Amino acid sequence: MKNQYLCKIYDNVKAKNLNEPEFLQAVYEVLNSIEPYVNENSNLEKNGILERFVEPERMITFRIPWVDDQGKVHVNRGYRVEFSSAIGPYKGGIRLHPTVNQSIIKFLGFEQTLKNSLTGLPMGGGKGGSDFDPKGKSDLEIMRFCQSFMNELYRHIGPNTDVPAGDIGTGAREIGYMFGQYKKLKNEFTGVLTGKGLSYGGSLGRTEATGYGLCYYTNKMLEVMKNTSFKNKKVIISGSGNVALYAMQKAQELGAIVIAMSDSNGYIYNEKGLNFKFLKELKEVKRLRISEYLKFDDSTTYVSCSKDIWKVKCDIALPCATQNELTLDDAKILVSNGVIAIGEGANMPCTLEATDYFIKNEILFGPAKAANAGGVMVSGFEMSQNSMRYAWSFEEVDNKLKTQMENIFLEVLECATHYNDKYNFVLGANISGFKKVANAMIAQGVC
Ligand code: NDP
């Protein structure tokens, strides 16, 4: 990064947020890659665009007291970052995981701003969550936690203000409890959350959207850049949650053989391919660990180290678990094993060094904010359907998702090509997303 304005912005962000490594990582990646655009647009500095772009509009932290089944009181910390409303109401998921802290919520909210811009829909950027661990909790404990979370959050959100959704640890069950509490507190039935159940305003296709969208994006990238597709490719997918599971299903529908998947304890491997139905039953219905898959299929191997999944030889890798799960060492192994494409299903799963390594080696690299935008895109469709008091069919949602994910890839490619960096889809996605946000900020004056 040579541009003085960019260097000054990054130094300031660093000085103010020294103990927020994930946030600094995300900001550095974006500032570094939008340099060619910033070089040719001096009005950005005059309008203080980057100063405002890296500072959340609002950061809320709050106490979440809840009672366990034994009657003991626990307290967790809740967060909501309302990062940018330049192009629409704040929009982004709620993460429930013991590792959640302010740095992680801010990095996710910052990334979300650009991702939402790439969808072409009028949605700003936000993110929230808590250091609460849903694992091993009873349904009633989850309900009491979600109600307490909403007891504070409800005053900050609304269908035209801030519309949260799911993320790690927050699925249909948690969204249901949060929605119920919001409705009770506000006495209104509105589309204030997305990822809702189908019987109370959810959209068909939302559950599948991020994983399916990831595959539509990756398949288009393979087709345009290498004249190939998922067909007969060996695929590994980290994680076995919402994104991973539906990426598996779509990759298989597109003809791939998904040979390895993981959770935070280990990974399963089967050269002939894993079975979607078994895994869905295991993770969505029974909520068991991935090691239990062997009870469904004893020809599968379990390795009790999730990081080692990247050592499995494959054509396509889809990291769909969490941030920084794929490092430079992992990238080197994947490349030496002949990987041709990476599609980021999780947010920032590849470290900066791993990402650079893939790009330098001309491995097709789908960055998260473009490749996993399908989830928030269908959340946007859910908001539209709620406003219209109408419901589209699954096919209608899925067709729109496919078309739009392919369009995002083409827009990213066009931008990367324009800046003579054809394989740098990080640059393409960041500049494409940033341009719209910056123009909206300039148009709206200093606010
Ligand atoms: P889920 O909670 O459904 O699943 C998360 C999966 O990742 C689980 O298999 C979990 O394993 C694994 N995981 C979590 N933390 C770690 C860790 N530290 N090390 C290894 N594995 C881990 O979450 P989602 O599938 O919804 O989200 C996954 C990623 O996708 C996140 O980065 C999220 O931000 C991103 N994303 C999600 C969207 C959505 O629509 N859901 C939209 C866009 C992005 P375990 O059970 O062992 O914890």
Image (spheres, rainbow, N blue to C red):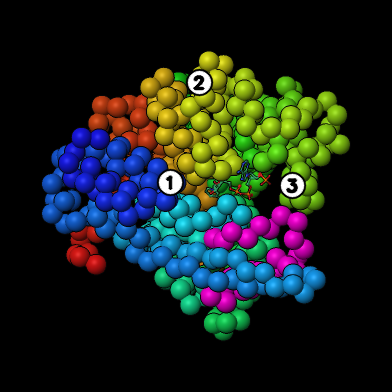
* Residues at marks 3 and 1, CA–CA distance in whole angstroms: 31 Å
In this rendering, position of residue 228 left or right of residue 243 = left
Residue 318 horizontal/vertical position (percent): 56, 33
Q: Is residue 380 visible?
A: no
| Residue at horizontal 68 percent and vertical 40 percent from the top | 263
Q: Which residues are magenta?
A: 129-152
Tag 2 secondary structure? helix
In this rendering, position of residue 83 left or right of residue 93 = left
Tell me the quadrant of the picture where the N terminus can be found.
top left
Residue 399 horizontal/vertical position (percent): 52, 46
Instruction: Find disc 1 in the rendering and name its residue.
Output: 21
Q: How many marks?
A: 3
| Residue at horizontal 30 percent and vertical 51 percent from the top | 15
Instruction: Find disc 3 in the rendering and name its residue.
Output: 283
Identify the image quadrant of residue 184.
bottom right
Decide: few, some or many residues near mark 2? Use Cα within 10 Å; few <14, some 14-19, many ≥20.
some
